Amino acid sequence: MNILKFSVFLLLCFSASAHTGSQVGIRGNIKILLNYEGHNGPLIQLSDMSVTNGFCPRNDYYILPKNHQYFRENYAVLLSAKLTGTPVSFVFTPGDCTDGLPRIAHLALEN
């Protein structure tokens, strides 16, 4: 029985690490922050967006969906970063798109 529990534990660990490993991070300054009618959240353009080429049909902007669990908090961080010129870091999962744009999964304000 202990071997079975240990095997299940290892399987879960490898599954979690495989999922985490598929995410990609990018860092940069916010060049454009806008709300555009017809999109499901604000659009963000960084100074360099080449890392996410091929993730989604479009790569000219990133999107923070309005249904994101921490939308309000993350939008406040985006506004702060834009106003102060502070770099931000975004994390994406390739192929996770909203309105054809790379969907921001996580973000952080950098020093």
Image (cartoon, rainbow, N blue to C red):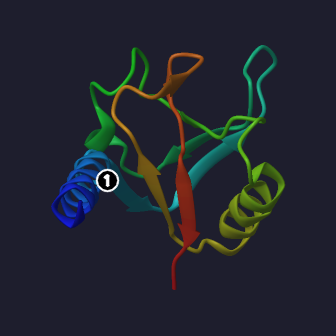
Which residue: 49% across, 24% down?
97
Image vertical order of residue 69 relative to residue 40, above or below: below
| Nearest to the observer: residue 53 or residue 70 | 70
Tell me residue 86's x, y (percent). Answer: 58, 74
Q: Quadrant of the N terminus?
A: bottom left
- Residue at x 55%, y 69% (from the top left corner): 108
Q: Secondary structure at mark 1?
A: helix
Q: Residue at x 45, y 29 (%)?
A: 96
Locate residue 80 relative to residue 27 in the image: left or right: right
Toward the front, the furthest residue is 1
Q: Count every numbered label the image shows and give the total.
A: 1
* Residue 82 spot, x, y in % from top left: 68, 62
Q: Residue 88 location in percent, x, y?
A: 52, 66
Residue found 20% across the figure and 59% down from its top: 10
Q: Nearer the viewer, residue 5 or 24?
A: 5
Percent coordinates x, y for residue 111 in the rendering:
51, 85
Q: Amino acid at mark 1?
A: Ala
Q: Is residue 1 above or below residue 71?
A: below
Name of the residue lying farthest toward the bottom: 111
Is residue 57 shown above or below 73? Answer: above
| Residue that carries the numbered disc 1 in the rendered image | 16
Question: Is residue 55 left or right of 38 when viewed as pictured?
Answer: left
How packed mark 1 is, by other alpha carbons closer than 10 Å (few <14, some 14-19, many 20 or more), is few
